[in-house]
């Protein structure tokens, strides 16, 4: 059963997922030319924006325009949702669900479903983090000799890099997200529907966050050395 400790651990993991996404964005912007970077994560951009669009339809927000490759980035322009309170946060957080479902589909399509990760939010945050990176390293080493794995990895990393809501998404949905976070805390603290919150966190949102964090961890394991190698080569080229 979820308690306040595991609930705050869940919030911390959500924040970590977003942080990983921003770190990857920072590194890739410095590894690839801008057009090359956008091309590299094409599948992720499309999935991200389509997730917003689907959420707009569900929350009854009129869509005026969808852009995937505008100079300033992809965007879904829409009016206010007709579903109150939860409309804006669900539209803002939609890529978290859409990208995760797409990742899950890739795991089953490439028959890696037995390697799907899980996180015990009741355990130590740092032990879970260590286990996550170990799982990522083990998953990578187990299939690295197969060419199909590299194709899967490209698709999955492209999507994982786009899984987190953007800064604009957070800005538009901040108060709604804060409301949902406080509501979840209150339901657990006062034990009102805490079983429902437990099911949502451990059976649904927890798995989504874990799956995204796994693929972002693999991306970081590959990307960080490439970033420093390129930086070292560029520095030596100056001398």
Image (tube, rainbow, N blue to C red):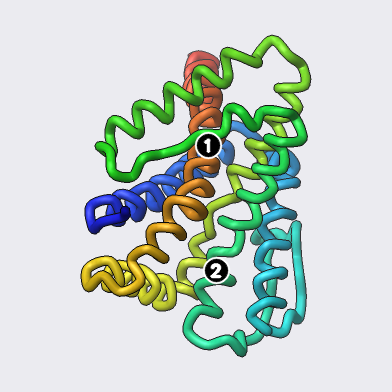
Classify residue 163 as left or right of residue 221. right
Q: Is 193 in front, or is 60?
A: 193
Whether residue 54 is visible to the viewer of this picture, yes or no, is yes
**Label 1 crowd (10 A; few <14 / some 14-19 / many >=20):** many
Q: Residue at x 58, y 86 (%)?
A: 83
Q: Residue at x 28, y 51 (%)?
A: 6
Q: Is 44 in front, or is 120?
A: 120
Q: Position of residue 223 (x, y in %)?
A: 54, 27
Classify residue 134 as left or right of residue 130. right
Q: Position of residue 221 (x, y in %)?
A: 50, 24
Classify residue 85 as left or right of residue 35. left
Residue pushed farthest top?
Answer: 145
Q: Which residue is mark 2?
A: 92
In this view, 148 is above or below 205: above
Q: Is 18 in front, or is 227?
A: 18
Q: Position of residue 188 (x, y in %)?
A: 27, 66
Q: Which residue is mark 1?
A: 216
Q: Are marks 2 and 1 in contact (CB under 8 Å)?
A: no
Identify the secondary structure beneath mark 1: helix
Q: Position of residue 156 (x, y in %)?
A: 66, 37
């Amino acid at each position: 059963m979820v308690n306040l400790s595991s609930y705050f651990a869940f919030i911390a993991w959500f924040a970590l997922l977003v942080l990983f996404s921003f770190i990857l964005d920072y590194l890739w912007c410095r590894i690839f030319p801008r057009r090359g970077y956008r091309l590299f994560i094409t599948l992720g951009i499309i999935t991200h924006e389509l997730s917003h669009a689907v959420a707009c339809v569900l929350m009854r927000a009129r869509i005026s325009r969808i852009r995937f490759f505008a100079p300033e980035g992809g965007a879904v322009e829409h009016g206010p949702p007709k579903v109150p309170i939860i409309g804006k946060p669900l539209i803002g957080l939609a890529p978290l669900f859409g990208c995760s479902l797409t990742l899950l589909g890739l795991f089953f399509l490439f028959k890696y479903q037995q390697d799907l990760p899980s996180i015990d939010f009741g355990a130590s945050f740092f032990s879970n983090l260590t286990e996550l990176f170990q799982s990522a390293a083990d998953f990578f080493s187990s299939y690295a000799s197969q060419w199909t794995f590299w194709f899967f990895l490209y698709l999955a990393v492209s999507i994982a890099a786009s899984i987190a809501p953007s800064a604009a998404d957070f800005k538009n949905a901040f108060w709604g997200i804060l409301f949902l976070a406080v509501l979840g805390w209150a339901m657990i603290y006062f034990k009102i529907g805490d079983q429902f919150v437990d099911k949502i966190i451990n059976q649904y949102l927890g798995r989504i966050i874990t799956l995204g964090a796994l693929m972002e961890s693999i991306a970081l394991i590959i990307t960080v050395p490439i970033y420093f190698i390129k930086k070292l080569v560029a520095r030596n080229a100056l001398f």
